[in-house]
Amino acid sequence: MYIIIVGAGDIGTPLIDIATRSGNEVVVIEKDEARANRAADDFDCLVLNDNATTKDTLEDAGADRADALISTTDQDATNIMVCLLAQEFEVPSILSVVHNPEHMGLFKQIGVNTMENPQELIAEYLYRAVARPAIVDYMRIGEDAEVFEITVTENAPIVGKTIEEAAADGILTDDMLVVAIERSGVDQPITPRGGITFESGDLLTVYSAVGADPEITDIFGHYEDHAE
């Protein structure tokens, strides 16, 4: 892909690294000279030390043939302007970081895919690691739903039960779905079926429409989560 990345700061730099290592043709626009020079030295890509909020700069970056543009600056106003200009070039995929949640609606209104403030995402992730130590990894979906990974303990109510039995006993509710089971000694993740029996030590990927509250983690034997 031909990708234009605006900003070579804390967010843009690892993105440039990933994009270039994946074999994409990457052009970086960074108005700060020191950052631009560092990106040019560190990565195999074209770096423009210029202001991305001008149409000429995007034209120089090849926006008319770009497959995607990602704006990663720390200013929402700059990101909005860049995205609006990218739309004039009819870039197929336009994505931006959004730092102020109040601006999320504006980005959506102009039809730009967004990622909320990554610093807040990191902060929430770190908090969850402390507040919900049982959760190995998670992803929020909408306001309440989550997909998370959790290990089944030996005293979990679901141990020794099949999926069908756990559902019939009301342990697994209609709001929950076990997506995958990783089990010691089994090379590939197990696709959950009604007759699969849960074992202690299983690492489950679970979808919960109501999130990973303590009442949910109890099912997998992590009662200590009530003490947050």
Image (tube, grey):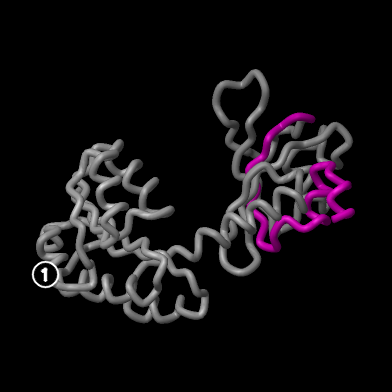
**Residue pictured at 71% horizontal, 42% vertical:** 150
- Nearest the eye: 31 or 22: 31
In the picture shown, does residue 176 fall above or below 198? below
**Residue pictured at 37% horizontal, 81% vertical:** 109
Q: Quadrant of residue 143?
A: bottom right
Q: Which x, y percent locates residue 145? A: 63, 62
Check disc 1 and report its element: helix, strand or loop.
helix
**Is residue 205 rendered magenta in the image?**
yes
* Residue pointed to by mark 1: 56
Q: Is residue 61 left or right of residue 216?
A: left
Q: Amino acid at mark 1?
A: Asp
- Nearest the eye: 86 or 152: 86
**Residue pictured at 14% horizontal, 69% vertical:** 89
**Is residue 57 rendered magenta in the image?**
no
- Nearest the eye: 98 or 217: 98
**Residue pictured at 28% horizontal, 56% vertical:** 5
Q: Which x, y percent locates residue 69? A: 26, 60
Numbered range of the magenta stretch = 200-228
In the picture shown, does residue 152 fall above or below 99? above
The C terminus lies in quadrant: bottom right
Q: Which x, y percent locates residue 42? A: 29, 39
Q: Quadrant of residue 64?
A: bottom left
In the picture shown, does residue 29 fall above or below 17? below
Q: Which x, y percent locates residue 216? A: 78, 54
